[in-house]
Structures are given as C-alpha cells and as structure tokens.
Amino acid sequence: MIKKIVVPLDGSKLAECALPYAEELAAKCKADVVLVSVTERVQGFRLVEDVSQPTEERLAPEAVGKMERQAKKYLDRLAKGLEAKGVKVTKEVLLGDPAEEIIIYTEVKKCDLIVMASHGRGGPSRWAHGSVSDRVFRAVCVPVMMIRAPGCVPGV
C-alpha cells in the first residue's frame, strides 16, 4: 500500500516532470506527497555588535542559508499547485549530498515510493556528472518510478 510518495526536486523543469505522476498516484492511492530538495549549507560570517573588540575578533560564524531559503520558496510554490488539487503535501529541505540525503530520508521516514526524473545521460556524460537517480535507485529498498527526461534518446 502506498501511503507516502517522495518526489526529489532540484529546481529544474526536468525534475518537475515527475510531479504529474506523483499527483496522479497520490490521488488514486490517497497517499501523501513529500517534496524534497537537497542543498548545501553556505557558511558565512557576521560582525558582532561589540565595537570594543578588533574587527577580526568580532567575526562570528553564521550559516547564511540563502540556498535553503530559495529551496523552501521553490517547494512552497510547487506545493500550492498540488494542494489546490487536493493532494496532501509535506516539504523538506535537506542538507548534504543529494543521493545520500534522499536515501536516508526515504528509509528513516518509512516512505513507500520515490517518483523522480532522470536526466537520461549516458556514456561519458554520465560518468562525468554521476547520476543521483541511479545512486538512489540502487540503494533504496522501496520502488522507484523513474521518469525519463523529455527528448531523451535511449541508448545514447
């Protein structure tokens, strides 16, 4: 029984190709959809207000989080569209390596299905860029519905 569907999104239109499939499955199975975006934490510094200290001692580490905020806004926008169609949506912004975080999240949160798009890269391009979808597919124990990239030419 499918109760929780994970849809990994990277901000690209290609990744969003998985949304109609997840939406239809969620409607038919009465399942929840979890929109997941994985980003890296950006580290920055800020000046502490105490002007009695030298400038270099007033720098305090601070997680800037700009990418996290952008990912959250992106997921909020996509969630509104699904929620308007009656789909129950959860949004998660994770930090780290995309494949690893998707794999861990799926296992820990006991998700039933992953619906994700594949860039459809082959040959040297795949070796150079790696494949998040392939790494996820090989590592999880739940079904993975892979949506091919529009215009993908098989075997290339």
Image: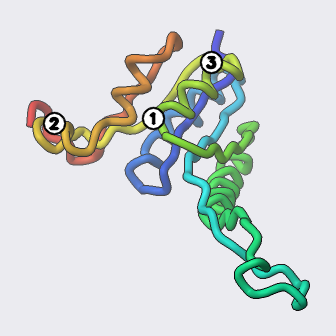
How has the structure been colored for display? rainbow
Picture coordinates of residue 48, whole percent (x, y): 84, 79
34 and 122: which is toward the camera: 122
Q: Is residue 139 left or right of residue 113?
A: left
How would you rate the neighbour count of disc 3 (Cα within 10 Å): few for under 14, some for 14-19, many for 20 or more?
some
Picture coordinates of residue 100, whole percent (x, y): 51, 31
Q: Is residue 58 above or below residue 138?
A: below
Q: Residue furthest bottom?
A: 51
Nearer the observer: mark 2 or 1; the answer is: 2
86 and 134: which is toward the camera: 134
Q: Secondary structure at mark 2?
A: loop
How would you rate the neighbour count of disc 2 (Cα within 10 Å): few for under 14, some for 14-19, many for 20 or more?
some
Query: Residue at point 57% right, 26% down?
Result: 25
Does residue 142 appear in this view? yes
Nearer the observer: mark 3 or 1; the answer is: 3
Q: CA distance from mark 2 to mark 3?
A: 28 Å
Q: Quadrant of residue 90?
A: top right
Q: What residue is pinned by disc 3?
A: 107
Q: Are marks 2 and 3 in contact (CB under 8 Å)?
A: no
Q: CA distance from mark 3 to mark 1?
A: 16 Å
Q: What residue is pinned by disc 1?
A: 116
Q: What residue is pinned by disc 2?
A: 122
Q: Of the residues shown, which amino acid type is indicated by label 3? A: Glu
Q: Is residue 141 left or right of residue 148?
A: right
Q: Is residue 29 above or below residue 123?
A: above
Q: Secondary structure at mark 1?
A: strand
Q: Of the residues shown, which amino acid type is indicated by label 1? A: Met
